[in-house]
Image: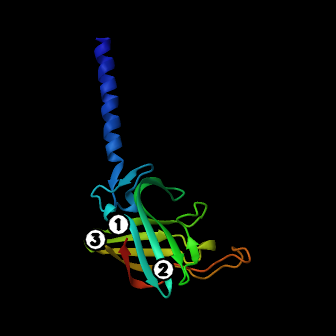
Amino acid sequence: MKTIKTNIIILFIFLVSIISCRSQSLPLNSNMKDIPSNAHVKDLDNELSQYVGTYKANFQGSEIILYITKTEDKLMDYGNQKFYRDVLIVKYIVKNSAGTVLQDTKSNNTTNIEFYSYYTYPTKNTVVFYYSGTNCRVGWGDVFLKKINSTQLSWEYRPDDIILDSNKCPSGTDINIYLPETKDLIFTKQ
């Protein structure tokens, strides 16, 4: 009888843990207010994969190459709220017309520039990205990538702040924004 009770307790604990694990997986566009600590916001409908790849565009004499990868369970730490989210990560290289590299976040793993997706509009084929800006956060804001077809993305960059607080940035720091500050720039998959 004691063995039966022990087995029932173990089974009950097992079922509760399975149910609680399942309840921690939420769809990609869950409302931020509804995401509990340590939850996993998952790409359940595989919306992000169609954006993965290398894309290239030219803008005002510069060549911009985007390297988009999908990462599962990126820790999102907002201080009082921490959870995991499936995201697209963008690394990029910007070259001038002579081929000189102006900014490279793909090869430079020590960079503190963040560029990752945080929302999708599936009916508009659009993913919204957070861009932390260049050095000293100059140019931080949102980037919208809209899937036009299987080989093209439309780019829109909306910087929230391009003003530099000179007290926060060391003298001589490169504070140029190399990403194209424009709308409807077409990137082509390579």
Foreground: disc 1 or disc 3:
3
**Distance of mark 1 from mark 3, alpha carbons?**
9 Å
Q: Which residue is drawn at 31% across and 29% down?
A: 12
Query: What residue would you read off at disc 3?
Result: 150
Query: Are the two marked residues, 1 and 3, in contact with CB atoms closer than 8 angstroms?
Result: no
- Residue 166, given in percent of the width and then of the height, sits at 70, 79
Query: What residue would you read off at disc 1?
Result: 51
41 and 31: which one is in front? Answer: 41
Q: In which quarter of the image is residue 173?
A: bottom right
Q: In which quarter of the image is residue 53?
A: bottom left
Residue type indicated by callout 1: Tyr
Q: Residue at x 50, y 75 (%)?
A: 141
Identify the image quadrant of the N terminus: top left
Q: Which of marks 3 and 2 is nearer the N terminus?
A: 2
- Residue 93, given in percent of the width and then of the height, sits at 51, 72
Up/down of 81 relative to 174, above or below: above
Colouring style:
rainbow
Foreground: disc 3 or disc 2:
2
Relative to residue 186, is residue 96 drawn left or right? right
* Pointer 1 local density, CA inside 10 Å: few below 14, some 14–19, many at least 20: many
- Residue 96, given in percent of the width and then of the height, sits at 55, 82
Residue type indicated by callout 2: Glu
- Residue 118, given in percent of the width and then of the height, sits at 41, 65
- Where disc 1 sits, the SS reads helix
Up/down of 137 relative to 184, above or below: above
Residue type indicated by callout 3: Ser
Query: What residue would you read off at disc 2?
Result: 63
* Pointer 2 local density, CA inside 10 Å: few below 14, some 14–19, many at least 20: many
Outermost residue to the top: 1
Query: Are the two marked residues, 3 and 2, in contact with CB atoms closer than 8 angstroms?
Result: no
